[in-house]
Amino acid sequence: MSYPKSFLPWIVFAIVSTQTGRQWSALIGLVLAGGLLALGRGRGKGWDTLFIEVSATIFFAGLSIWAFSEPGSPARGYVGALTGLWLALTTWGSILARHPFTLGIAKTTVSLEIAATAGFRRVNLVLTTVWAASFTVADLAEAVLLHYAPHATAALVVLKVLGFAVPLSFTVRYPRAVRARAQKAV
């Protein structure tokens, strides 16, 4: 499963930004995202399997430009929430584009026959919806917390971790449950 690796720039950004500030953490996120994208393409991965890497590269490029050009921006305190909301927009956007981001990654783990089924597409639509909902809820909660209690760093970390851990756990378990049900039906 390459989901954790795909989200590495976001995770590292969340950790590093607490230590170095948003300019350098944005640049580190950009280098990691661009590196993962280049590495994936170099290994022959299709664009559909690199959806999150492309999104991360675009986001961290824009964030780096903004962070260095507007270092005193009043919105700088909300960058953590903005990263998650970008991910939420990315995942919801992939659903609206009728190509859930999990689909490209999941296709690399199954046969072409399975990947072509409606059930496989439905599973990936559910998975991507859970990722999108988790990012949305966690980062809206983070934005509210940042507004009312900006120094509640432990709560912010918990929200960020849950925003990734819940859908990751669901991504591991849900396909197994669907397979088990399908095997029982046969």
Image (tube, grey):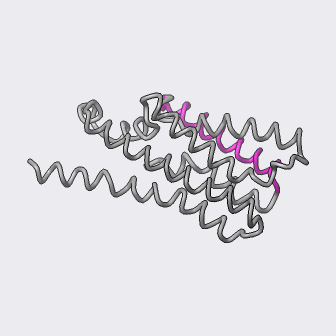
Please indicate whether residue 49 sits to the left or right of residue 24 in the image.
left
Please indicate whether residue 186 sits to the left or right of residue 177 in the image.
left
Is residue 180 positioned above or below 158 on the image? above
Q: Position of residue 97 (x, y in %)?
A: 47, 28
Count of numbered labels shown in the rendering: 0
At x 69% / y 62%, what residue is drawn? 145
Would you say residue 33 sits in the magenta stretch? yes
Would you say residue 92 sits in the magenta stretch? no
Is residue 47 positioned above or below 145 on the image? above
Query: For residue 100, what is the image quadrant?
Result: top left
Q: Position of residue 117 (x, y in %)?
A: 25, 33
At x 69% / y 47%, what residue is drawn? 82
Q: Position of residue 155 (x, y in %)?
A: 65, 69
Please indicate whether residue 74 sits to the left or right of residue 17 in the image.
right
Identify the magenta region: 21-46
Q: Position of residue 140 (x, y in %)?
A: 62, 53
Is residue 127 positioned above or below 177 on the image? above
SS assignment for the magenta stretch, majority: helix
- Residue that lies at the very extreme toward the left in this rendered image: 186
At x 50% / y 46%, what residue is drawn? 132
At x 82% / y 58%, what residue is drawn? 20
